[in-house]
Amino acid sequence: MNYKTEAYQLEDFIREMTDIVEKTDSEADRVSKAEHLVGKLIRSISWLTEDKRKPSNEGYARYSLYVDPQDRFEVLVLVWQPGHKTSLHDHDGTWGVEGIVSGQVRVTNYIQEGNVSKNVVRLRHTGSIVVQEQDTGTLLPPADCHTLEVEGDQPAITIHVYGKQLCHFKVFEPTGEKELYNAKVSYVKYSG
Ligand SMILES: [Fe+2]
């Protein structure tokens, strides 16, 4: 008999996630199955080494944990201090799952309603929620724009899985006109 007593590890997640991307084509399928696995992965982070739990003085810290060799998904950990917040951003057209290991994160969501011109995009605010410790959330274009910020005065650790290695994404700044935002490309930087 096989009694499995060890906690779910990053290696288990990678193996199961690889199996999912090999057996599914639809992004909607992948994102819902990935969310289930992220839920398992964040129950315990005994697998997360100390060097990838270090906060940064320059905003939230971002560490790469894994990139699929065929670029079908990547896994990241973000380490947040109270007051840290992202810009309003998209995910370069791919799906995403986030899971809160510890702390609380406010997620404010927007849906893309199309380009008004080359660099001006219409975004509609669709709500704001506080994601609690051990909860997960998903992103699927065109509902793939959001800000994340630490809620309250506790630090946070979050796990993120995207449908490819996110090398760049768009950030959006208000034009001053309702629902219209200037878009510009930003390149991902890692903390270590
Ligand atoms: Fe994001």
Image: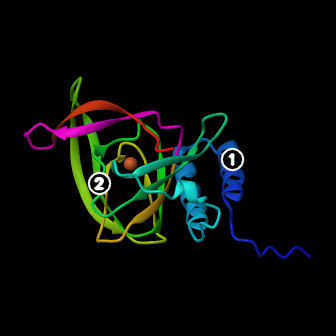
Q: Viewer-nearest of labels 1 and 2? A: 2
Q: How is the image coloured?
A: rainbow
Q: Amino acid at mark 1?
A: Thr
The residue stretch that appears in magenta: 162-179
Residue with the mark numbered 1:
18
Image point 15% across, 43% down: which residue?
179
Residue with the mark numbered 2:
85
Query: How far apart are labels 1 and 2 at the CA level?
Result: 31 Å
Which of the pair 123/47 is nearer the observer?
47
Q: Position of residue 98 (x, y in %)?
A: 46, 57
Q: Is residue 165 left or right of residue 146?
A: right
User: What element does badge 1 sit on?
Assistant: helix
User: As drawn, which residue projects farthest toward the right?
Assistant: 1
Which of the pair 116/96 is nearer the observer?
96
Q: Is residue 32 left or right of residue 81?
A: right
Which of the pair 18/184 is nearer the observer?
184
